Amino acid sequence: MKSLWCAIKSEVVKLRHTPIFLLHIIVPLLGGLLFAMYFHLYSGQQSITQRLNLILQATSAFFPLAISIAVSLGINLEEEGHFQALFVGMESKSKLIIAKLILFLGMGAVAIVILFLPILFSVAVMDQELSISVLNTVLYSYVYLILGNIVTYIIHFWLSLKSGLGASVITGVLESLIVILFSNLPLKLVISWEYIPWAWAVNMCRQEILQFNAQLSTLQPNIIFKVIIITFVLLLVFCIWFEKWEGRKNYEE
């Protein structure tokens, strides 16, 4: 545990002089301000659930692209040194990549908080629509956005290490389009979506909105369980792959 914490601190130092931390503040802040303006301007035309639903769907759709860019920039730092920093200094390479994953997940979690704060301000102060139900919906959606995107982070770490920035970002664009597709399909038509990682965040948030409207029971625990199990298995597979990975062929002498 101590070595993992040291690895996380080392990653923070690496990223300190890059734009990655700043991007995780500025982008969600601008997005949150735009969403807050939308929330206020359409307060008399759309219900609070309609506005929350649109914001959560838009956030879910943007997340894969944002993850692909952020992770690619982070791995690009390692690529500049031919990934040598990934192969020395720790008894387990998996700890290093898990430290990177934890750091980027943490930055993503903070970014969502920054995104939601202007929206909650608009709900509470400008529109005076804040309630316990709204807070619960936002809180659960926050958890679902993080939980539903862990696999996306894993995929983009793998792509960025194996193929580079281009492959990761192109995949991020495709993933965002897939999320948009799922967000426009009625939930009852999306069969077994709990086995499709790019449907997780948007559909869990949509079910939370339906729960807010009292149109559907709370998200079934077995779905959350399946998401967690699939995430754990893919993380394990990724760690095994990374332990055996020796860098890209174009860097081999």
Image: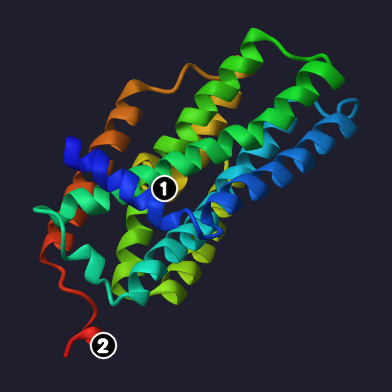
Q: Position of residue 54 (x, y in %)?
A: 69, 38
Q: In this orientation, does residue 178 appear? A: no
Task: Classify 64 as above or below 245.
Answer: above
- Numbered label attached to residue 104: 1
Image quarter where the N terminus lies is: top left
Q: Residue at x 43, y 59 (%)?
A: 71
- Numbered label attached to residue 40: none
- Identify the mark nearer the N-term, 1 or 2: 1
Q: Residue at x 44, y 72 (%)?
A: 165
Does 213 sit left or right of 204 as displayed? right
Q: In this orientation, does residue 60 appear? A: yes
Q: Residues within 10 Å of mark 2 (few under 14, many from 20)?
A: few
Q: Amino acid at mark 1?
A: Phe
Q: Closer to the camera, 53 or 144?
A: 144
Q: Closer to the camera, 164 or 62?
A: 164
Does 197 sit left or right of 111 as displayed? left
Task: Classify 250 as above or below 231.
Answer: below
Q: Give the distance between the C-alpha atoms of the residues marked 1 and 2, in whole angstroms.
A: 27 Å
Q: Position of residue 158 (x, y in %)?
A: 30, 63
- Numbered label attached to residue 250: 2
Considering every residue shown, the one lying at the far top of the view is 132
Q: Residue at x 54, y 25 (%)?
A: 208
Does 45 sit left or right of 51 as displayed? right
Does 138 sit left or right of 38 as displayed? left
